[in-house]
Image (cartoon, grey):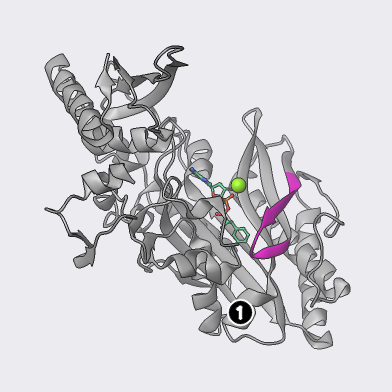
Amino acid sequence: NILLQCRYSSSLRSTTILDKQHPVDEWTNITSSIISKIPLRLHTKTGHPLNTLRTLIETHFSGFSHVSSFSPVVTPFKNFDELSFPPDHPGRSVADSYYINKDLMLRTHTSAHEVEMFRKGEDKWLLTADVYRRDEIDASHYPVFHQVEGARIFDATPTGMQEVREDNERLASQLARSNIIIEDIPHISPTNPVQSLHDPEFVQLVAANLKLSLNGMILKLFGGASDVPLRVRWIEAYFPFTSPSFEVEVFYQGKWLEILGCGVVVNATLDTAAVQNKIGWAFGLGLERIAMVLFSIPDIRLFWSTDQRFLSQFEQGKITVFKPYSKYPACYKDVSFWLPSESKLHENDFCDLVRDTAGDLVEDVKKIDEFVHPKTNKTSLCYRINYRSMDRSVSNEEINSIQSQVVQQLKDRFNVEIR
Ligand code: FA5
Ligand code: MG
């Protein structure tokens, strides 16, 4: 991969993350702007909306233990293999995930710690952490976001199942008294099967417990004092580490919002963790999307703002409506170029290049044109970068200087011909 070899040329043979040095290699694609986010741990900052949301979730799950201190640096084995991801899963590619080198990466989801948590002998636990994915740039996508993982396992015995039955009755009676409309689907179906080692009757009970627990949490977060019923819908899903699997959406402010993925834990996960004769559920939810609607935060980059006009609006433990302060003007810059023949530029490579050069001054990146020259067979691309600061007014000279760095990086790393 030419790009990576150029970026991590002979002068740079290691990279430092959380005070530890790591060798770099041809897999390395982590950028300095990503590395700079790792120590920030927004989900632990007093008063931060992400921390408030996390603590509300923790209060809902009484009796669950909480962890929020695990390092994001994990092995691909832990992020993928231990969770039964197939060897050719696309999430493993350098286009989608951040690698420090071929043996270490930044976790792409909190599920990376499931085996570790179960191995500790925990039966009910919650884990909150920053996760990293290479992605496009806009108001609802940022390469770092936060997830809460939760799980509960029961004894796979008649006594254990009696415990689930009783818990289900308790949870159902709480929900029965509330103003919630749930569009449910069967716990089990031919496309969403019971695992071969599981007793279908146990799976029915455990899946019901999962749904009741999560419906209760969603009601706590979104229900408020509204006299309009809260609408929640369950959708069939697929994850390599749960079966059956589900996704949950909430109807909020006129739109269906994807909240979380979940399911009955794949037995191999518990086996790897040396947990025997247990059956249970796990879920993973994204904090930003929920916080954006609950606190009316219009842009995902605001979570990273250090501006007092943002931070001073929030109080630990309280959901309040964010009042936007005036936006600074946007500044659009286009860059058009020819790719060298037989060369490919992944959209995420372009976004990372821009973000690494311009940091949080980039609001949005859009491809506005692409064509192949009929004679030379070369590809022409045009990207429009929208620069805007959240915190201050930026001069045209400053943006021009950043834009020329972006252009220089494009030439250096991808060998493009600027048009
Ligand atoms: C997962 O990450 C699974 N680990 C969830 C899981 C856990 C399933 C345990 C089963 C058992 P997914 O990629 O769909 O799944 O992400 C889960 C949630 O994270 C989504 O529902 C969404 O709320 C949030 N999320 C995903 N991608 C982004 C993103 N780019 N920006 C913000 N939030 C995101
Ligand atoms: Mg999903």
Q: Nearer the viewer, residue 12 or 48?
A: 12
Judged left or right of residue 94, residue 223 is: right
Answer whether residue 302 is visible to the viewer in this image: yes
Q: Amino acid at mark 1?
A: Asp
Mark 1 surroundings within 10 Å by alpha-carbon count, few (fewer than 14), some (14 through 19), many (20 or more): some
- Looking at the rendered image, the quarter that the C terminus falls into is top left
- The residue at 28%/58% (across/down) is 25
| Residues in magenta, as a range | 233-243
Nearer to me, 397 or 178 = 397
Q: Which residue is disc 1 drawn over?
A: 123
Disc 1 element: loop
Q: What residue do we see at 35% from left, 59% from top?
A: 44
Quarter-of-image position of residue 88: bottom right
Q: Is residue 283 left or right of residue 232?
A: left
Examine the rendered structure and indicate whether residue 313 appears above or below residue 42. Answer: above
Residue 41, image x, y percentages: 32, 56
| Residue farthest along the front direction in this orientation | 375
> Image quadrant of residue 208?
bottom right
Q: Residue at x 81, y 49 (%)?
A: 184
Q: Is mark 1 within 8 Å of ligand 1?
A: no
Please identify the dominant SS of the magenta region.
strand
Inspect this view and state whether residue 390 appears: no
Tell me if residue 163 is in the magenta stretch: no
Height in image: 258 above or below 110? above
Residue 202 is situated, as x and y percent measured from the top left of the image, at: 83, 74
User: To which quarter of the image does residue 339 belong?
Assistant: top left
Residue 32 lies, with reference to residue 72, above or below; the image says above
| 27 and 176: which is toward the camera | 27
Kindly identify the residue that appears in the image at 31 percent across and 55 percent down: 26
Residue 240 x/y as whole percent: 65, 61
Q: Relative to residue 213, is residue 395 drawn left or right?
A: left
In front here: 337 or 386?
337
